[in-house]
Amino acid sequence: MLVADKLVVLESKGPTVNLHFEWQAPVTLAQNKKIVVKIDDLDNIEDVPGVYYFARNFGEKSEPFYIGQTLNLRSRVKSHLETRRIADILRGMTLPGAPTINNGGRSFHFAFFR
């Protein structure tokens, strides 16, 4: 798979498939182990298909800890944030079977599929 400036090209033994994703500005979800985003703040995310990931930020870098795809980005991120498990992970709590995330802010990165 090649990633080049918002264009993802999947290479296979058959025909090449070109997928175009429009990456949006990340949304800050948590800082200092406190959730800082409100569910209503996510209303500007379109109800369209796309890909997304939750990440831990440190400096200019981010490290994904959950990656997904959906037919409706706004509804999906809201449903994630309404679950206690994701909220606990964003606050840095240690949970069985969940990734351990230490320091650093948490953000939601997403792209619309066009």
Image (tube, helix red, strand yellow):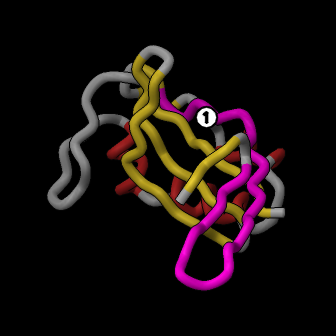
Above/below status of 21 relative to 56: below
Residue located at (80% from left, 65% from top): 48
Q: Helix, strand, or loop for circle 1?
A: loop
Image: magenta residue range: 7-30
Residue nearer the viewer, 21 or 45: 21
Residue located at (40% from left, 20% from top): 58
Q: Position of residue 17 (x, y in %)?
A: 70, 73
Q: Position of residue 64 (x, y in %)?
A: 42, 44
Residue type, label 1? Val
| Image quadrant in which you'd find residue 79 | bottom right
Q: Is residue 22 magenta?
A: yes
Above/below status of 107 relative to 89: above
Residue located at (60% from left, 85% from top): 14
Q: Quadrant of the C terminus?
A: bottom right
Above/below status of 52 relative to 88: below
Q: Position of residue 32 (x, y in %)?
A: 39, 20
Residue that extends furthest to the front in the rendered view of this protein? 13
Q: Residues within 10 Å of mark 1 (few under 14, many from 20)?
A: some
Above/below status of 79 relative to 100: below
Residue that extends furthest to the bottom in the rendered view of this protein? 14
Q: Is residue 56 magenta?
A: no
Residue located at (64% from left, 70% from top): 70
Q: Read off the residue under disc 1.
A: 37
Q: Position of residue 8 (x, y in %)?
A: 66, 57
